[in-house]
Amino acid sequence: MTQFIEQDASFFKESKDALVDRLLVHFVDICYNCMMLLRGGDSTTYVNQSGRAVRKAGMLRIRAIEQIRTIFTVLSKRGPM
């Protein structure tokens, strides 16, 4: 995803299109996980789709912020769907 954001001549249009196609398959799950990590509330953990308990604090929270920002940047650079 980071390669997509960077305007690098070596990352050709076909590669960008293939990346977006792969990303869109998992878009809902990625966004859901990020939002659950960022969501406030009483609990400090939540159970993800695989049944694993995930903490909602520390580095995971920072990574969720960065990942969701990156996802929306990729989608904004792709143009209309």
Image (tube, helix red, strand yellow):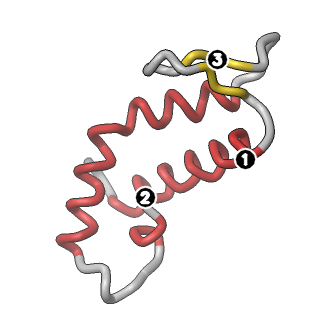
Q: Residue at x 61, y 20 (%)?
A: 53
Which circle, 3 or 2, is nearer the viewer?
A: 3
| Residue type at the position of mark 2 | Val
Question: N-terminal of the two: label 1 or label 3?
Answer: 3
The residue beneath circle 3 is 46
Find residue 56 and report its image quarter.
top right
Q: Is residue 45 above or below residue 38?
A: above
Gap between marks 1 and 2, in whole Å? 19 Å
The residue beneath circle 1 is 62
| Residue type at the position of mark 1 | Ile
Gap between marks 3 and 2, in whole Å? 27 Å
Q: Is residue 59 above or below residue 54?
A: below
On the image, the x and y values in percent for residue 1 come to 43, 61
Q: Residue at x 54, y 20 (%)?
A: 52
Q: Residue at x 40, y 63 (%)?
A: 77
On the image, the x and y values in percent for residue 26 come to 34, 38
Find residue 42 and report its image quarter.
top right
Q: Residue at x 69, y 41 (%)?
A: 60
Q: For the residue labelled by badge 3, is the local secondary structure a helix, a strand or a loop?
A: strand
The residue beneath circle 2 is 74
Residue 49 lies left or right of residue 80; in this view the side is right
